[in-house]
Structure formats: C-alpha cells, structure tokens
Image (cartoon, helix red, strand yellow):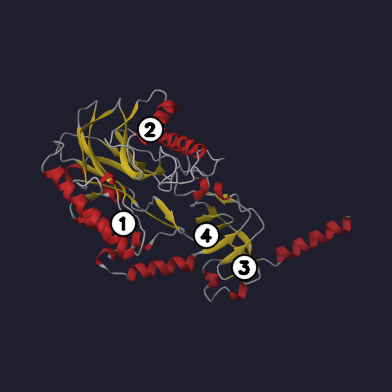
C-alpha cells in the first residue's frame, strides 16, 4: 500500500514538474501548436466573460461587443468594428472544468489556472478553479431623491402557454414571480418602468400582489394599460403609491393599437407627492435583434422615428403640462448603433453614458454592452443625479432564470440588468 501511495506521489510530482508557466497572450504570439497536449499554468489573471454548462469563456479583460465601442458605426464606418471583433476573438480561451456553472458569474477572475491544452484556445482541467471577485456586486450607491428602476423582466405572463413560454408550468411561473418580486422590492425604487410584461393588467396585478406581500409596508400599485389581456408583451409601470402618483392619459408611439409596438412605446406622467414636482417617464422596447443586422436595424429605426414624433408632441404641445422627459427601456441596440445616435442627435442627452460609460447591462456570446438605456430631454437632464446598471442578471448563467427550479434567489430573474436612475426634481422647465 505504501508503495502504491509513493508511486502516486511520484507521478503527481512529475506532472507538476511538467507544467510550463506561460503568459497570455504573449506566450502564444506564434500560435498554440507548441503547447498542444501539454500542461500549462497561465500566470496572467483571466476574467470570466461567458459561462456555458461545463465550460467558461475567459480572457485577459472583459470583452465588449464592437457595436458598444466602435465610434462612427452609425455613419457606416466598420473599420473599428472589425478591429474590435478580431481583437476579441484573439483573446478568447475556452476552459472546460469541474464547475457548478450557476455559482460562477462573469467578471470573476482566475489566477494561475493550470490546465491541459487540447486545441488552439481550448483548455481542459479536472480541477475546480478558484475564483476571485465572484461574489454578487452590491447595489449601486445612489444619491437621495426619486429612484426610477428600468427593467426587462423577460416575458412575464399571467396566462400560461402561448407567446412567452408555451411549456411554462404554474410552479415555474410562481418561481419567476418570487424572483422578480424579491429583486424589485430589494431595489426599493419609487417607480419601475417594465419591459416584457404581458399586455393587459393581470400580469401587473399578479406582480404587484407579490411585491406588496413581500414588502409588507410598501404600497405598490400599477398603471392600468386599459386593455384586455393579450398573447403578446408590452411595457408598463409599477410605482410606490405613498411616494408618487401617475397623472394624465398614457401616450403611445403608434396610434394603431393593432401594431405590435403600440404597447411597447409608452409615456406616463408622474408627480412626486412630497414636492408636487412632475416629469414624464417614457419606456420603450424596440425591435429585437432578429434577422440580418441591416434588417433589424431598419425596423428599429422605424421605431425611433415614431418615438421621436411622440416625444416631440409631448414636449412641445405640453401633453402632460411638462417638458421634462426621461426615456428608459430595452432599446435592443448598443451605444454606437444608428438608433441610439439618432436619439442623441435629436437633442436627448445620453445620461447613462454620462454617469457610467464603461458599464454594461447585457452579455451575449461572452461580449458585454448596453442594450438598456436612459436619455433625458434638455430640461430633464439637470434633474438626473446618477445612472447605473445593477448587475443582478447579465453576469449569471442563463439557466439561473425561473426554469432552474432550485434557484429562488433574486439573481438572474431576467437576462437584462436593471438600470437605476436617481432624480432630484425641480420646477424649472
């Protein structure tokens, strides 16, 4: 027995001696081929950029989608875009390892990882990696004032089946409700501007009931859409009735209720009870990134054109008696894309970029970026005191959503991070 243990010790020691210390990407400047089949220890700190079942996508820095950083993209200059794309590809390493993926968040750091190189850019290890910076990020510290939370809640439906998730069970729906209500009451906002909630009032009522039950002292209410339930998603508002009150008639980006986007571009007036100050909160959920890039971009531009017509009417015709407009929502496009730049060129200040230009709200194929936005009209911009994403969702493995029946935490209640906006309202227009 002692001989056997001694043999294992010698073999293990020999394998350690065979490990070659390398840096990334410097050691691989001439390619991966000299290291294939060998054990290496990468001494460069590596960030988790993506998380897929039994493997991680790691790189020496967080990776951002080219559309987030490629200045000039809206004008058709793709040179920077392809440079960023190629740089991202050159930095990616796939690490297959012994992990419980739902416990690893993107942004976590690996140091001195030891693994075998099995192919260019592909590592395998039987060990469980040790991570740094793997704890959930705390809620951003926001200045005192009126707090708005803009969030996508990923196809939240009262009616089971149909458009959102045809195979959703009542148990899964209850878990989704628990996760969302836990997250939103934890955020403790005065107003929640919500994307991807079922058209009609039933889903909003269900969520408000859960939030009130959890918060106990809070008085949450929702703004009625005035429509019967439908098998489609819409945008809506939940608010603290002891802190704010809605006023005026809802305004829509499309006049035709049969248009799918009629319910996804909405504006509502809100009054802060303690001060009597008012502002207009507009939430939008533009066309998703389906089809070719040019096709989906063109359809988002149609959305933006309709949005600007509505905003012009609200601002200049004083529909709500106030020109202070805050725009939030899921715009389904990144900072340098044409729809975002068009809104900025129309005179709306990108307050998200003003306060948190290096952040993100969404991670796709290991690349991060802002699909979720916040803009302000000229008179509103001075009343915005802070804007930050809260990384409750995008950093976590996607099956952390309500389909993972064992996970009832507030994390990964949706695929987008909420955006928090702190306001100090004044009467100056």
Q: CA distance from mark 3 to mark 2?
A: 47 Å
Q: Are marks 4 and 1 in contact (CB under 8 Å)?
A: no
Q: Which residue is mark 2?
A: 188
Mark 4 or 2, nearer chain start: 4
Q: Position of residue 408 (x, y in %)?
A: 52, 37
Front residue (pair 196, 246)? 196
Seen as rendered, the residue at the extreme left is: 317
Mark 1 or 3, nearer chain start: 3
Q: Is residue 52 above or below residue 30?
A: above
Figure label count: 4
Q: Secondary structure at mark 4?
A: strand
Q: Is residue 417 above or below residue 192?
A: below
Q: CA distance from mark 2 to mark 1?
A: 28 Å
Mark 3 or 4, nearer chain start: 4
**Quarter residue 267 falls in:** top left
Q: Secondary structure at mark 1?
A: loop
Q: Position of residue 71 (x, y in %)?
A: 29, 63
Q: Are marks 3 and 2 in contact (CB under 8 Å)?
A: no
Mark 3 or 2, nearer chain start: 3
Residue 424 vs residue 152: left or right? left
Q: Are marks 2 and 1 in contact (CB under 8 Å)?
A: no
Q: Is residue 10 visible?
A: yes
Q: CA distance from mark 3 to mark 4?
A: 14 Å
Q: Which residue is mark 4?
A: 58
Q: CA distance from mark 1 to mark 3?
A: 37 Å
As drawn, the label of residue 117 is 3
Q: CA distance from mark 4 to mark 1?
A: 24 Å
Q: Position of residue 152 (x, y in %)?
A: 37, 44
Mark 1 surroundings: few (<14), some (14-19) or many (≥20) residues within 10 A: many
Q: Which residue is mark 1?
A: 335
Q: CA distance from mark 4 to mark 2?
A: 34 Å
């Amino acid at each position: 027995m002692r001989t056997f243990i001694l043999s294992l010790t010698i073999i293990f020691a020999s394998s350690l001696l065979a490990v070659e210390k390398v840096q990334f990407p410097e050691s691989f400047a001439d390619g991966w081929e000299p290291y294939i089949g060998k054990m290496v220890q990468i001494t460069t700190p590596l960030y988790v950029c993506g998380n897929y079942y039994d493997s991680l996508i790691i790189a020496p820095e967080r990776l951002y989608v080219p559309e987030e950083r490629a200045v000039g993209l809206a004008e058709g200059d793709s040179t920077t875009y392809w440079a960023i794309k190629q740089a991202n590809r050159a930095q990616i390493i796939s690490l297959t390892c012994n992990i419980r993926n739902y416990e690893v968040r993107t942004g976590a750091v690996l140091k001195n990882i030891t693994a075998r190189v099995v192919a260019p850019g592909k590592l395998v290890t039987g060990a469980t990696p040790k991570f740094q910076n793997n704890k959930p990020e705390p809620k951003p510290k926001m200045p005192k004032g009126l707090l708005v939370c803009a969030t996508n809640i990923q196809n939240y439906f009262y009616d089971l089946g149909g458009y959102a998730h045809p195979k959703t069970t009542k148990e899964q729906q209850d878990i989704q409700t628990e996760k969302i209500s836990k997250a939103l009451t934890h955020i403790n906002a005065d107003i929640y501007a919500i994307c991807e909630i079922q058209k009609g009032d039933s889903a909003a009522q269900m969520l408000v009931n859960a939030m009130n039950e959890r918060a106990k002292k809070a008085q949450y209410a929702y703004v009625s859409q005035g429509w019967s339930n439908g098998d489609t998603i819409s945008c809506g508002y939940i608010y603290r009735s002891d802190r704010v009150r809605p006023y005026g008639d809802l305004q829509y980006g499309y006049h035709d209720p049969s248009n799918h986007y009629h319910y996804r571009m909405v504006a509502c007036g809100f009054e802060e009870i303690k001060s009597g100050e008012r502002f207009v909160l507009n939430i939008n959920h533009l066309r998703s990134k389906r089809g070719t890039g040019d096709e989906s971009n063109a359809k988002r531009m149609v959305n933006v054109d309709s949005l600007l017509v509505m905003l012009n009417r609200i601002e200049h015709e004083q529909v709500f008696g106030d020109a202070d407009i805050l725009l939030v929502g899921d715009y389904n496009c990144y900072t340098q894309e044409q729809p975002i730049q068009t809104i900025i060129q129309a005179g709306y200040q990108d307050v998200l970029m003003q306060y948190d230009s290096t952040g993100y709200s969404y991670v796709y194929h290991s690349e991060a970026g802002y699909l979720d936005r916040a803009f302000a009209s000229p008179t509103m911009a001075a009343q915005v005191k802070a804007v930050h994403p809260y990384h409750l969702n995008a950093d976590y493995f996607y099956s952390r959503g309500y389909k993972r029946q064992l996970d009832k935490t507030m994390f990964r209640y949706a695929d987008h991070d909420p955006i928090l906006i702190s306001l100090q309202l004044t009467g100056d227009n």
